[in-house]
Image (spheres, rainbow, N blue to C red):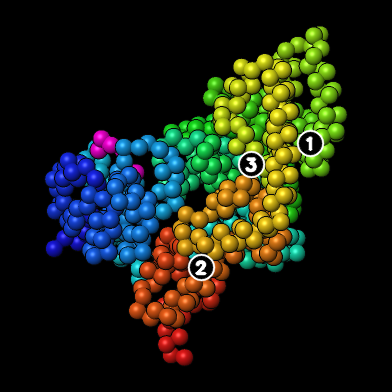
Amino acid sequence: MAEFSVIIAEDEKLIRNGILKSIDWASLNAEVTGLAKNGVEAAGLIQEKKPDILLTDIKMAGGNGLDLIKNARFHAPDIKVVIISGYNNFEYAQQAIKLGVKDYILKPIDIEKLRGIIEKLTFEIQQERSDRNDIKKLEDFYNDNKQILINEFFRELLFGVISEKDLDKLLPAYGFEQKSAFYFPMILYTEIKNPIEWASLKTELTEVIKPSLTRWSLTIDSLFLMPNEIFYTDITLVLSSTNFTYDLNRLLPDIKSAIEQLSEISLLAMGMGEITGKLQELSLSYQKAKTHAMFSMISGLNAKGVSPDSSEYALPVNIYETTRNLHTILKQKDKQKLEEFILPIEKEISDNSIGIEHKRTLLRNLFVCVLSAGDELGIPVREFFPDLMALFRYINLKTIQELLTKIRWACEMIIGQQQTREERAGVNLMDRAKSFIIENYSDPLLSLETVSNYLSLTPAYFSRLYKQAHGTSYIETLTKLRLDRAVKYLKDNPEMKISAISANVGYSTPSYFNYIFKKNFGQSPKDYRINLTNS
């Protein structure tokens, strides 16, 4: 009997049988224990056979591949999934990554490549089996997941969710209370070209920028992904150093050159916030990093071909001040003040003695300020510009008057969105948010971005509102819901496997569920159940 079992779910018979017959399964110490022509058949086979590996198409009759994967996690939580698809769709790939899919192979299938993937997975399964009793591996896992919590801590810090009082309590837990350093956030706006696991991308990105960071005596304290499935992906880093010797005009080009070595991502823009010795000031610095990155994107300064030594990396002197002024005007929804603000600009661009490039630069900078002010107000301004990744080309193609009209329109939209939001406040937006979280807590794809998109708010703005309304953060609410439900399963279903409980409450891996459970209750789910039985 083979050591590893495989199920193939594919609605095209020719492809299904082709995979079955083209691979020497015995040489992999594996066997195909089931063939399914749709999602329903596949779900039944997974429940019955509990396979080690699932090969599935992403679009099939009887439920798509993503739904099947969610179902599979309940009955076979440790299953390794490989998606086979004719759709080179980044949205699907991104969701697949969140569900823990191990690989994503496009049709027509390269059988040798598929065989190599399966061979790698069988080795991984073998290692996992031997590692279950390895204390060293468990310690490594603890440290890995501690970094996940540190990333969440920094995300809430950047979003302005953590108060100074709470910060003093949290710093010792993450080991930062003794660290005397200078910090700053850096944002990378990227387009991910090929489907790749975030863990792999993170490792590759870290490795490729390590020489640059070493040259500048920098340490990565946090690195996390902010996916935006429509436009681009934000990668945010919090960097620190005890040696304060930075030159923005040299640091950014140095890191840019390093990142361009990666084939998996295309760097659209990068931005850096102000350097601070106080962690509580990182939120304001983060807003400035986003403004800087937005300016770089719209101006095209980070496009390939721009010289790393270019003096153009210097920011316009007035961009942050203009953003603050616009933020105040738009927040007050004062159309009179907005008109007073735009009138001199309109007069300037009508002056025939002023060159076209000066006018275009002025409007380009103003565009950045409008978008940044809207973002700080929690308005998802990206929805206004579906061509945002190529907006700098848009700016260069449109006439000066068209650009000013677009800027006016964006300001009016931001004011209008705020008014709409206030009108809906009677329904209590944050109560809607909590209800949405309660209804969807068991979905492993539920994220801060999912909830904020549902409410048409930016993640940072939603995080602040939620903490103000409920006195607890989004992630704390989600974790409590999941753990409360897990405790109920442990009490009411003594025979239910811990891995099944983990999947049923929304954790994509049982090991991470165990870590979170132990962190909150001081004991593992298994020990908790034993103590319940003995009490």
Q: Which residue is mark 2?
A: 482
Is 351 left or right of 30, judged from the image as shown? right
Q: Is 499 in the magenta?
A: no
Name the disc covering residue 401, or none. none
Residue reaching furthest to the top: 353
Vertical placement of 476 versus 411: above or below? below
Magenta segment boundaries in residue numbering: 104-109
| Image quadrant in which you'd find residue 514 | bottom left
Q: Earlier in the sequence, mark 2 or mark 1?
A: 1
Residue depicted at 34% across the width and 49% down the height: 64
Vertical placement of 177 versus 221: above or below? below
Q: Is 105 in the magenta?
A: yes
Q: Which residue is mark 1?
A: 326
Name the quadrant of the N terminus: bottom left
Q: Position of residue 221 (x, y in %)?
A: 60, 52
- SS at badge 1: helix
Which amino acid type is shown beneath numbered disc 1?
Leu
User: Would you say the residues marked 1 and 3 are in contact, meaning their CB atoms lie under 8 Å apart?
Assistant: no
- SS at badge 3: loop
Q: Position of residue 416 (x, y in %)?
A: 72, 39
Which amino acid type is shown beneath numbered disc 2?
Arg
Q: Which residue is mark 3?
A: 380
Residue depicted at 80% across the width and 40% down the height: 333
Q: Would residue 450 be seen by someone viewing this image from the given angle?
A: yes
In the image, 23 versus 386, the foreground residue is: 386
